[in-house]
Every structure is written in C-alpha cells, then in structure tokens.
C-alpha cells in the first residue's frame, strides 16, 4: 500500500491524494486503509518513515571530498529520478500545509543528515577540517543546492551539479565556514 | 486583491485557496476576480510577478563577502518573516502541482538571481574570483541553504545562518568551485 501511495503522490501531487483512491489502486478495502492511517497526513508520515528506512547507508571513500561527492551523487540520482523526484516534491509541498507532515519530513532529513555526518567528523579527526565544525551543517550544505534547483528552477539535476555542490561544501568546510558560532561543539 | 490573495495564501496554504473566498475577503465581486484571473494558477502567477517587482534592488558594499551577506540577510529576513515565509512556502508548494505556477516561480527566481549576479561579476573583474565562474550559481548558492532550512527543518532562520551561507559561497567562489564545467562563460 505504501508503494501505491508513493506512486499516487508522485503522479498526482499531494493536493489530490485521496485515501479511497489509494485503497482502490492497491486493491484493498477502504476500511483497511482508513483503519491503518485515518488521514492522508498519517499515510505521508508513514511513507517518510519507510523512505528513511530504505535509504542507502553512506559510502566511505577515505577523503572528505570523495565522501561528500558520494552523498551528492546519491541525492542527485534520487531527485533526478522522475518518480522519486516527484515524490520528494510532493512530500515537501505536503509539509508546508500540515504540521504533522512537516514533523515527519524534518525527522526524515535528521536521519539522513545523521547517517552522513560521521564523514565530516572523520575529516575533523584527520585534521582536514577545523575543530568545532558543525558536521550536520556541512552535510546539509551538500544537499541544499540540489533541492533548491529542484524546487525553484527548471534546470536538470545532473552529475555536474552534484559534484559542484560537494566541492563547494568541502572547500568551505576546510576553510572553517561551518564552525559553530555559538556555544561549544 | 493581490494583497488579499497573498494574505490568504500565507494563512491557509495553497491547497485551500479559493477565488470566491478571495473575492469575499477583498470585498469585490466574484465576477471581477474570475474575469481577471480565471483560476488560482493565474492568480499565483500574477502574485509572483508582483513579488518580483516589489523585491528590493541589490546593495553594493565593495566586497564579494559584503555583497553576498547583504543578499543572504535579505533572503533570511524575508523567509523568517511569518507572512512572507508562509507565502514563499505556499508558492513553492503550488509550483510542485502546477506547471504554469512552476514557470512563474522559475521566472521569479531568475529575476532575483539576475539582480544580484553583477556583484559576482564585479568580484571577477577585481580578480577576487576566477574567470569563468558561473555568477548565477554563486547567487543561488547563497539562497539554497536558507530555503533548504525553511523547507526541510524546523530550525529558525537567523542571521548566523545567513552569514554562514554568504561566507561559504564566497570562500567556494574564490576557490573556483563555481567555474563553468562545460563550454565557455
């Protein structure tokens, strides 16, 4: 059913998402769908949990740039895929309308950022990046230009965009641009 | 009427936007609203044109970092403002559902990027940033982390986030991270 819900969201966007329609497409009873999720919000939250669980673990390449490029390429491939890209657009749009969906979306990105943040910590340990760097911010800096392009432009998300996002984040991290400004690390 | 449309979008999100409701709130006849815009899509496109026209011109500080910080602070103040932040979320969400709205949104960001890109060209002319740098990409790099934070986290958009976005973009631009990879500038 989550597969069908994801397909429907990707195809039609969240504004037209309807539990009865999903039940019909998944060929299950309406009651089953309503009992399980109650509302579209509940379904989208469940879908985001599933997306987080199915996300790939990080790859280790031995260098900060290599690791950030691996991360950027993964995000780029995901967002450039027609179904996945449309699905991410739809859940981000749904989150702007509904506090519970926003919470589930924030949780999804927290999990993804935590998955990749250790590669920045390793760069700190190697002395490649200064102490006190906000490891989470570096990971977010890699994704940000790719999501920004997806949402605010019609430009294609290609590998060049991914590599540039990784390179810019690596250069800025090495230069100390992501050092925490308040309190201690 | 655009003021009322903007208020309604900011308050209720685009999923509940209704032309008849806007006519009622603006105290004009329904016919006037339908004749002018026809659909919610037409109205949002008009609103984006108005937002582009009302956007502030860029400030010149004499240094790349200063200029990018001024840009970042402007984006941050806009997105951190409750009404404006909600309005931007709503138009981005609307653009994920409707090709014409997406076009209007892309046009809005094109205008904003073109407004600020000359500060990167000036940095190239001063020798601060290498030749062949994609000036538009540098400007997008300043906005991207702020929009990413707005849409994917519950974290507050503060001035520290704006300054960090500007610093990271300036450092990466100086290091040549935004040089065009294909063709010539």
Image: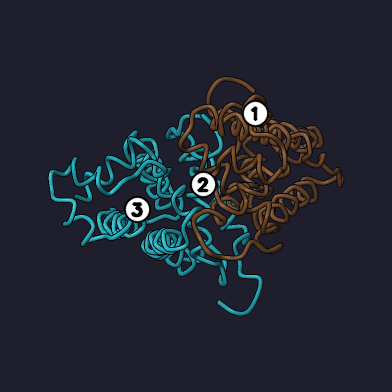
Chain colours: A cyan, B brown
* Crowd class of label 3 (few under 14; some 14 to 19; many from 20; radius 10 Å): few
Q: Which chain hosts label 2?
A: B
Residue under the image location 56 percent in, 58 percent down:
A173
- In the rendered image, residue A9, in percent from the top left (x then y), is placed at 33, 42
Image quadrant assignment for residue B57 = top right
Of residues B56 and A18, the one drawn nearer to the viewer in this rendering: A18
Residue of label 3? A61
Q: Are marks 3 and 1 on the same chain?
A: no
Sequence-first disc among 1 and 2: 2
Is B14 positioned to the left or the right of A44 in the image?
Answer: right
Of residues B140 and B138, the one drawn nearer to the viewer in this rendering: B140
Residue under the image location 25 percent in, 42 percent down:
A21
Between disc 3 and disc 1, the foreground one is 1
Q: Which chain hosts label 3?
A: A
Between disc 1 and disc 2, the foreground one is 1
Residue situated furthest top in the rendering: B183
Q: Secondary structure at mark 1?
A: helix
Query: Looking at the rendering, in which quadrant would you find the N terminus of chain B?
Result: top right
Of residues B106 and A98, the one drawn nearer to the viewer in this rendering: A98
Whether residue A113 is visible here, answered yes or no, is no
Of residues A181 and A39, the one drawn nearer to the viewer in this rendering: A39
Q: Secondary structure at mark 3?
A: loop
Residue of label 2? B16
Residue under the image location 19 percent in, 47 percent down:
A23
Q: CA distance from mark 2 to mark 3?
A: 47 Å
Q: Are marks 1 and 2 on the same chain?
A: yes
Residue of label 1? B31
């Amino acid at each position: 059913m989550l597969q069908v819900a994801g397909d429907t969201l990707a195809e039609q966007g969240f504004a037209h998402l309807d539990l009865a329609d999903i039940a019909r497409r998944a060929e299950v009873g309406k009651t089953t769908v309503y009992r399980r999720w109650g509302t579209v919000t509940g379904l989208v939250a469940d879908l985001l949990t599933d997306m987080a669980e199915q996300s790939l673990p990080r790859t280790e390449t031995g260098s900060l740039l290599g690791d950030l490029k691996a991360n950027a390429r993964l995000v780029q491939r995901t967002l450039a895929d027609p179904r996945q890209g449309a699905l991410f657009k739809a859940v981000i749009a749904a989150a702007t309308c509904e506090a519970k969906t926003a919470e589930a979306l924030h949780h999804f990105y927290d999990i993804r950022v935590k998955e990749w943040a250790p590669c920045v910590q390793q760069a700190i340990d190697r002395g490649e990046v200064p102490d006190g760097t906000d490891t989470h911010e570096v990971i977010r800096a890699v994704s940000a230009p790719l999501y920004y392009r997806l949402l605010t432009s019609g430009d294609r998300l290609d590998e060049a965009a991914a590599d540039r996002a990784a390179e810019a984040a690596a250069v800025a991290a090495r230069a100390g641009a992501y050092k925490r400004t308040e309190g201690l690390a």
